[in-house]
Amino acid sequence: MTIRYLTGITTTGTPHLGNYVGALRPAVAASRRDGTENFYFLADYHALIKCDDPARMQRSTLEIAACWLAIGLDPEQVFFYRQSDIPEIPELTWLLTCVTGKGLLNRAHAYKAQVDKNTAAAVDPDSDVTAGLFMYPVLMAADILMFKAHRIPVGRDQVQHIEMARDMAQSFNHLYGEHLVLPEAEVDESVAMLPGLDGRKMSKSYDNVIALFGPREQVRKQIFSIVTDSKAPGEPKETEGSALFQIYQAFASADETEALRKAYAAGIAWSDAKELLFARIDREIAPMREKYDHLVAHPHELERILLRGAEKARARATPLMAELRHAVGLRNLGDQGPGKKQKAAKSAALPTFKQYREADGKFYFKLVDAQGKLLLQSGGFDSPRDAGQAVARLKADPAALKLDGGLQAADGVHLSQIIAALQDLTGPEN
Ligand code: TRP
């Protein structure tokens, strides 16, 4: 089964090293894995929630797009697009809005944080809260569900949003049938958090970042402003809790990290350690910076790439949206699709699995079609649980079905017929 990964970056501000280490770099590495499809997009509708400066919106979208390509994302190999080029996303947002409890959104961190802040300041709880901020998780769910993404690599702070997307998909499927895939958050603990200049998580909101593609001199200056303790040259230094060390580790090989650990113990001067860090980062970033500068200077090239990406993404979004519109009843009036009754009749006409025990004490299952004709016969399992798991695997990935001693097609039945029956059973292309 192809696993679909999806990652969005809100287009506010300029990417910093924390974004690079925590999200961009692992995402590009992942895009090269076999058996995966990868979706990377610029979340500019999300940016509108926070940013009402049109020039900054445009500039930031340009910089972030350039950034992805500069660090090695291959737009031919992945789906690389701008959220606002996919009109199906706001459309899906509305369908999801209508199956989402307001109470669920009341619990979203970003909204709650603002309400808590207002409460503490004794002002109206909804002061400075736009409906956009409140709806943020629904838009994000639409981003994800639109492309049937399975895994969403995110930082800890976003896990709640992925769970909300799951909830929304579940509500939708419950009401309208199995159309949406339930996504899962994937938090890579080893890269989730790069410390910033002051040792707290590197983040725009703490103003403690190191620029990713800033001018070299700026990057150097930022690195030299990393907070350290006051130990003098020659005094042994702690690697534990050292932001400088942690940032170095995010770029260095195991050997290089070990060498710096020894240098700490031997009392390396902070200024020398900072010089080492700067050189190590620059070694990785300098070649990318050239490409970045080129793209930022040639925005038409970027625009072309993004529009092509949108076309590719919409080839997925448009058919799914049509399916969903039909599912909820936004239909051509001339087209009398199956009503509730006929739908029930259709599900009664599905193939079924039957599990049973034979005289040999073993547990078996078989798949029969709607007319009761045998399609597939299993061998014996030691426990009903094993048999059940084998059934679940077939349902999860019909296309992976292989016939062997343990699974045999009935006489005159083709593998492709069995796969088609399994797919009928598990609903539209899950
Ligand atoms: N909200 C995410 C962030 O601020 C960005 C984002 C928008 C996103 N839509 C998404 C991330 C969908 C993953 C999947 O980081």
Image (cartoon, rainbow, N blue to C red):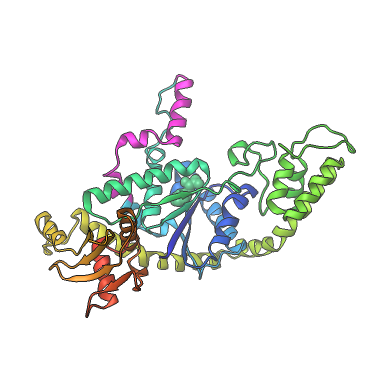
- The residue at 85%/37% (across/down) is 236
In-front residue for pair 84/136? 136
- The residue at 67%/49% (across/down) is 211
- The residue at 71%/59% (across/down) is 284
The residue at the far right in this view is 234
| Relative to 164, residue 1 above or below | below
In-front residue for pair 364/59? 364
The residue at the far top in this view is 122
Q: Is residue 116 magenta?
A: yes
Point out the stretch of residues depicted in magenta: 93-122
In-front residue for pair 171/313? 171
- The residue at 24%/62% (across/down) is 425
Left or right, 221 with respect to 68, comes to: right
| Relative to 425, residue 134 above or below | above
Please tell me whether the stretch drawn in magenta is mainly helix, strand or loop.
helix
The residue at the far bottom in this view is 412
